[in-house]
Amino acid sequence: MSENHPTNPSTEVGHAHGAGELVHPERFADPGVPAHKHRLTDTDPKAAKRAERIIILLFGISALGTIGTLVAYFAVRPDGTTPGVRTSTILLGIGLAVSLLGIGFAAIHWAKALMSNHEYIDERHPIESSPEVREVAVVALQQGVEDSGIARRGVLKGAMVGALALFPLTVAVPLISSVGGDWNVSKFRHTLWKKGVRLATDPEGRPLKAADLTVGSVAHIIPDVPASFRQSEEWISEKAKAIVLLVRLNPEDIRSEQRKGASYDGIVAYSKVCTHVGCPVALYEQQTHHLLCPCHQSTFDIADGAKVVFGPARRPLPQLPITVDDEGYLVAEDDFSEPVGPSYWERLK
């Protein structure tokens, strides 16, 4: 018994020439352009006017977002504390988001509601079009401008130009205001670390003893400074330079150090500031003793003086020489072995 199956006309163009041999079509039928469906704004002038007002409102919201960003930039300056920096960053982010989203939503709504949505077929040719065809293309572009309605919608055009003209101020004003700022790079040569400063956990600020660390353990470290200093305006910038990653290895696993005797009983301390562009290096792989920077995958071997084993960084992470005091607390013996962070123009490498 046999079954009859429907034949697909797009694939069958003739009978088989031989056993197992099928004849493939040379081309498929052009489905054409579907019938154009008019939008409400195409047939109802009130709907078109309503859409225009919505777009103007969105451009206005964008302009307010730009103004709000500038106000936040000048009125809510970071005061050096974590809450102050967080508040300033959030307000700037909200202002920028409102400014950009207003422009984006306005452009999308304009395109969907008011601009021409007719479908056009443009035959593509491998050679340059003739002058006549290019003239037709110019006419089509001019017709597109006319269909957008920008020429006869003065308020809409003004709202768009105003929003687009104001938005660059969100970038230009901070850049211009930073001209003449503090460019003293020599401050990167020294941090809060000096002889006798205890190593404290971040963010608690609890001093750490060598006995608190087991082999393979990792701790995020900051200098043990008075609580009053941690509330000052200097703390954020100074802490950013002084952050350390502390790891305890088996002493026999340490192959080299940047300074002889810089570690203590297998405990090594290296700057967390990547020497590529300054991202925090804090992803530790215990089996290989590798530290990974999550930004650009620079990899450092802390068992071998934090030398670069992969990635764009050009120099090792600076090492903090450490020892213990009379009470068993881990303390710094000196500042870092060299300036922390990325290379800059005063450095030779």
Image (cartoon, helix red, strand yellow):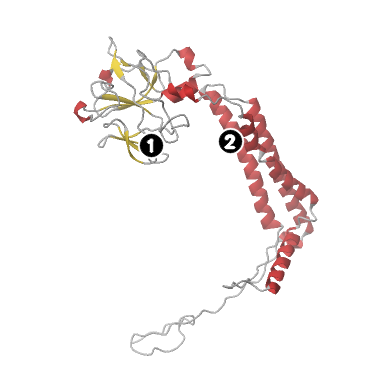
Where 96 falls versus 22 (above or below)?
A: above
Instruction: State the image coordinates of residue 253 (x, y, percent, origin top left).
Output: 21, 30
Q: In terms of depth relative to the viewer, which is nearer, 16 or 47?
A: 16
Amino acid type for the residue under numbered disc 1: Arg
At 54% from the left and 79% from the top, the residue drawn is: 29
Q: Secondary structure at mark 2?
A: helix
Quadrant housing the N terminus = bottom left
Which residue position holds label 1?
Answer: 314
At 27% from the left and 13% from the top, the residue drawn is: 328
Instruction: State the image coordinates of residue 2 (x, y, percent, origin top left).
Output: 35, 86
Disc 2 crowd, CA 10 A, few/some/many (<14, 14-19, 20+): some
Which residue position holds label 2?
Answer: 93
Of mark 2 and mark 1, the one earlier in the sequence is 2
Q: In terms of depth relative to the viewer, which is nearer, 347 or 317?
A: 347
Instruction: State the image coordinates of residue 239 (x, y, percent, origin top left).
Output: 45, 22
Q: In terms of depth relative to the viewer, which is nearer, 228 or 311?
A: 311
Find the residue positioned furthest to the top.
326
Amino acid type for the residue under numbered disc 2: Gly
Q: Secondary structure at mark 1?
A: loop
- Residue 224 lies left or right of residue 258; in this view the side is right
Q: Are marks 2 and 1 in contact (CB under 8 Å)?
A: no
At 64% from the left and 72% from the top, the residue drawn is: 129
- Residue 254 lies left or right of residue 272; in this view the side is left
